[in-house]
Amino acid sequence: MSPKIWFIPLILLLFTLVGCSDDEEDAPPPVTFDSINMYSAYDSIPVGVGFTIEAYGYYSDGSSESGIDYVWSSDDPTIASIDTKGKALGKSVGQTTIRVKDRGIESSVSITVTNAVIQSLNISPGETAVALGINVPYEAYAIYTDQQPYKILDIENITWYSTDKAVASFPDNDGIAHTLLEGDTEISATYGGVGLVFPAILEVTNAEMTSLVITPTSSDTVPNGQSISFQAHAYYSDDKVIEVTDIATWVSENDAVITASSILGRFDAKSVGTTEITTRYNGTTIYTPVEVITAEFESLKVSSAESTYPVRINSQFTASAEFVGDISVDLTNQKNGFWQSSDPKVATVSLSGLVHMRTPGDVDIYFTFNGESEKKSIQVVEASLESLTIHPSADYFVGEGHKRKLTVTGHYDNNTSRYLTHNKNLTWKVLYGEDSSINDGEVSQGGEVFNYQTESPISTYFTVEAQMGDKRATSVANFGATEVLQDNEITLNFIGPFTDIDAKSLLYFNNFTLVHAENGTTGPDNSTFIMLTFNEATDLCQTLLYDGFDDYRLPEYAELQAVWTDYDGNDDASYRLYNDKKWAIGQAFWTVDYGVGGEHLLVDLRTGEEGLSAATDTRQYASCVRDVVK
């Protein structure tokens, strides 16, 4: 019998005891072990592929426990075996049932093993740059002939490589690259006799951390008995931002009010009061105030995107608690709440509310919290995927060193559409055309397109492809060569001037009649950049959609002048904004401020010369800026 882990519903402490009795009939009923819930991420796997099936045990008082130590078995271990911790492994083609049992309670799921074979191997991230001392975790996915990607958990049979072990290495062969020295190295892996077509590039820099920013994922106020999560992001001198939540140190200054949970960055409220959360990383300490309040629980709410789903689809369900005073708390991952499926043969649900549709039928997805239960009734139907679409599908910008989130919608033969971006059966890739030496960007398994810093002086266009089964969809990404620059406080993002090619292809505004040809000294040789009147420049920024944002404006004089000061600062011919950041600076730039005589002030990013101005009907370069919201 497995050890029991109690999750005591702390919210019960909020209720006032109005009386008590010595009568036996007033005694609480005995706690019983009621059910086991299983979650299987796959219905079928190829021979040789393994994955872990999750199991959770639930008690009549609302407490729960992990079922990892329950008794696991397979009806036919020659088809699929199961070890004592719930890891299933495909052995031969066929179908079998995986069972888990404890204290007379049993649950089961069926698994089909196919003869699909491995075709290719992908790792993520494809290219990244980090400061020395930051370890980089990599994930590997094997694509099989059934067109499904399977995350490789079999660390015994995958081998990780770094071409320059002095720069980074894999001492434990666990996919975590340890950075050791400044420089570049190629990251690769082999699995099942298959290697990578394109190795990943890892750049280890001498960048220094400039700030540590802590943000609560919801609010800095939490009802007593609930949990609150924080995230930590480290900002570096090379404009990189890295989430360090899982490697920072988190401490509560008053454990009687709120205490750290086993999940880094998450804290459990214990009693009403105020305190601070202390976060330490890389020699920096941040104190974040948090308040635990009294709030009376009212009701539960379980939500999902749809009420009808096709088979083989995953969908994230959410649960929230409504408290008196219009306070709503997300309970989806709360420690004292649990998910359960009324019929695991139709759909299974994970501990975090991720539902996997297995076979056609009706099923209820329950969430229980502090003895209260709420359900969402759904129908799983047999439907065939007819087509995919990617949003955005039209050409879009991805600034150098930045990323853009794409989404995929699947369209089915029963006239329904589904969000498939994070579906485990969806694969992504960037198509580089005939020139296989070009590898300036990548797309992650979650649909994020990354544009890495390159030597290219002008923008490059690539096709991004999403595939599920035999269905494909594409979109065109413009990987901008010009870096997006930030001010010292990281509150502003500046976009450089646009070429006429970019403007004609991607800008809503393309009302320009004059271009300037750069000469290779202040901009890429023979590239032509649009020149605009003041009103045209204003329209350009107001209609600009770049890096997924549409809130751009023309900069103030002091803002743009500070760009020259921060990134150049010398009136010689070094032209660092072009040579270091690839901004074309052969002409002056508009600002919204007025100079003497009513003309608009200009900024010369070549020399920083002050006092320049021009009439609104002349044509100059335009930079757009947006305020960064943290």
Image (spheres, rainbow, N blue to C red):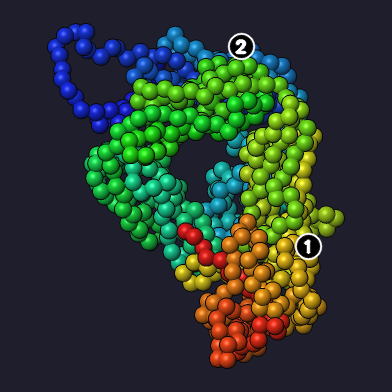
In x, y percent, where is residue 66? 43, 25
Mark 1 vs mark 2: in front? 1
State the image coordinates of residue 449 (x, y, percent, origin top left).
66, 52
Q: Within 10 angstroms of label 1, few (less than 14), some, or many (20 or more) residues? A: few
- Describe residue 492's horizontal placement relative to residue 615 as left or right: left
- Which residue shows up at 67% across the image and 34% down it? 418
Horizontal placement of 78 versus 234: left or right?
Answer: right
Residue reaching furthest to the right: 434
* Secondary element at tag 1: helix
Q: Is residue 327 above or below residue 244?
A: above
Q: Position of residue 89 (x, y in %)?
A: 63, 24
Residue 75 disc label? 2
Three-letter code, disc 1:
Ser
Q: Nearer the viewer, residue 344 or 45?
A: 344
Most foreground residue, 611 or 117: 611
Kindly identify which residue carries mark 1.
505
How far, Cα to Cα, is label 1 from label 2?
59 Å
Near mark 2 (Cα within 10 A), the count class, few <14, some 14-19 or many ≥20, is some
Where the N terminus falls, by quadrant? top left
At 73% from the left and 47% from the top, the residue drawn is: 429
* Vertical arrangement, residue 475 with respect to residue 522, above or below: above
Rendering coords of residue 22 (x, y %): 14, 12
Q: Label 2 sits on what residue type?
A: Asp
